[in-house]
Image: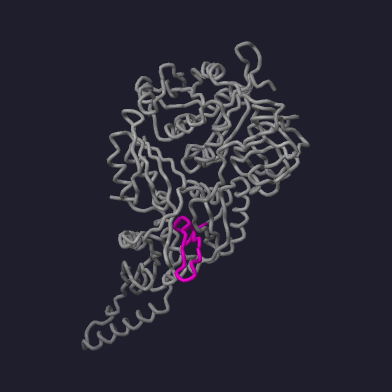
Amino acid sequence: MNPKSIRNFCIIAHIDHGKSTLADRFLERAGFILKNKGDQVLDQMDIEKERGITIKAHPIRLTYTGRDGSPVVFNLIDTPGHVDFNYEVSRSIAACEGAVLVVDATQGVEAQTVANTYLALNHNLTIIIAVNKIDLPNADVDETKREIEEIIGLDASDASLVSAKTGLGVDELLRIIEDKIPSPSGDSGAPLKCLVFDSHFDTYKGVVVHIRVFEGTIQKGDHIQFMATGSEFDVVEVGYFELTPVVTDALTAGEVGYFAAVIRVPAEVHIGDTVTSAVQPTAEPIPGYRPVLPMVFAGLYPIDANDYEGLKSSLQRLQLNDASLTFEPESSGALGFGFRCGFSGLLHLEVITERLRREYNQDIIVTVPNVRYRVIKRNTGEEVLADSPSKFPPLGEIERIEEPFVKAEIVVPHEAIGDVMELTNKRRGIYINMSYPESRRAVLEYELPLSEIITDFFDRLKSITKGYGTLDYELAGYRKERLAKVDVLVNGTPVDALSFIAHEDEVQHIARSMLQRLRKYVPRQMYEVALQAAIGGKIVARENIVQLRKDVLAKCYGGDVTRKRKLLEKQKEGKKKMKQIGKVSIPQEAFLSILKRESDD
């Protein structure tokens, strides 16, 4: 295919700004769907449609008639936008030459808009601005253009005005994409160089690798190599994506498509890796690759112990199409047998657990999310990587604990700087720098403990910045901190699934807050139940669940007072015995209640 007739681009937008609806109009103009019959075609999962988010990248090839009457091929890559999928988005953006920035005329510029626009600018993409929903009565096009110019810093004077719902202005936008986005460069005769930006698993073909060809040609029968892992395979199929995959003879420089090579192990394919010829390899890989490492860990346990194998099978099937999900078996005294799972972030955790419940009918309990700590033993100097409090050595054997820190870049409106700095200080942030790219926008650089931002930090940031705050972070290594493992005891029995790691200065506050929430969900017994938080053998917080009382004196209508005392003493002894042998069952709601920390207020 002639590279001059190709345009590779993605769509950038905040949640509910109309990205998927605009993609439907593009598909409609290409003849793939009937007019106004599209229903977010590229967002195939129910959870994507319900929450208005894109979880999985969806490439598609669209063919239009160009200005000169010849066919023009548009390769659209629909990408996720949440910070949890930042690396995957960066690889999809690296496969494009341009991006369409969609902004809702009724809501203006919001968080994801800013973050992914800068990601696209960092990759030197051509940005085309489209102001959407101009047909609504409360649309304010002029104010939206002003926000784009002041908050993002792009010239919006010639922005396209469209309504993705009605199709108004879509044809003009397609012409602008054809005119402004540059066609890809690359030599089809050079050694093969392809970027892996996604993959999925097919039962018959194995791992299907989504690629953008930068140099050379890939075709059936080629002996290829993944440069990061060194693995070699023989290509058995090459094609590109329409609504269904289309097999073709070859993909040349500038094209976006896929190949299959009977790869049965998904771990062999890494997003961001470079594919080249094993016979005539390229000199340098495409820059920007890094291994996708899990950042957040949590235990998943079946409510019914008999569902263990079903949960294992469901996780294996999910992992086939999601390489960033990891899991290994673990057991808990309170919850039985389950799995320790690794996720790229808290949203990723929520999506996986929701899919397990909906698509695989799994009733599960999710434990408190943790990060991976580095524990140094006192006498031996042995290093232990612990992603769960249960994996920590005994308190007396610990020399020091190191926790992962991230370098965070927070973009905020200037009026929210004070509130954001207060939030980061409460989360043990270390200030590095502040800059003002624009008059109304500031960039704050902080080092933050990863454990402090994996729960509700992003939600709190959006709340105090009215949706304009954005967060981007990367791992900055480990740092020694004064941390403690806190065990939670229910009726004197440790519940390992409730244990957590906290900074020594915050242990009492966090423990007391957790026990107060826990008290609301643990059912009352015939005896008093003590909820305790302990570090080693020292109790740092306690809450009591008041006992249920039975009026044993109700049948006493008179007589000597000693008769009443005798009944009360008998009841007291009975309650003491019940407390010794009684077991307190903890409902699922109790575990869910502690997944998110309370407001910093």
Instruction: Return the x and y of residue 157 as percentages of the image width and height.
Output: 40, 17
For the view shown, which residue lies furthest in the top direction? 68
Residue 311, located in which quarter of the rendered image? bottom right
State left or right for residue 469 relative to residue 316: left
Instruction: Return the x and y of residue 218 as percentages of the image width and height.
Output: 72, 33
Residue 104, located in which quarter of the rendered image? top left
- Answer above or below: position of 312 versus 261: below
State left or right for residue 432 relative to residue 44: left
For the view shown, which residue lies furthest in the right direction? 221
Q: Is residue 242 visible?
A: no
Magenta-colored stretch includes residue 332:
no
Residue occupying the point 32% across, 85% down: 570
Where does the N terminus fall, quadrant-wise?
top right
Magenta-colored stretch includes residue 387:
yes
Toward the viewer: 22 or 382?
A: 382
- Answer above or below: position of 252 versus 310: above
Residue occupying the point 33% across, 73% down: 528
Toward the viewer: 528 or 161?
A: 161
State left or right for residue 515 relative to residue 176: left
Q: Which residues are magenta?
A: 364-388
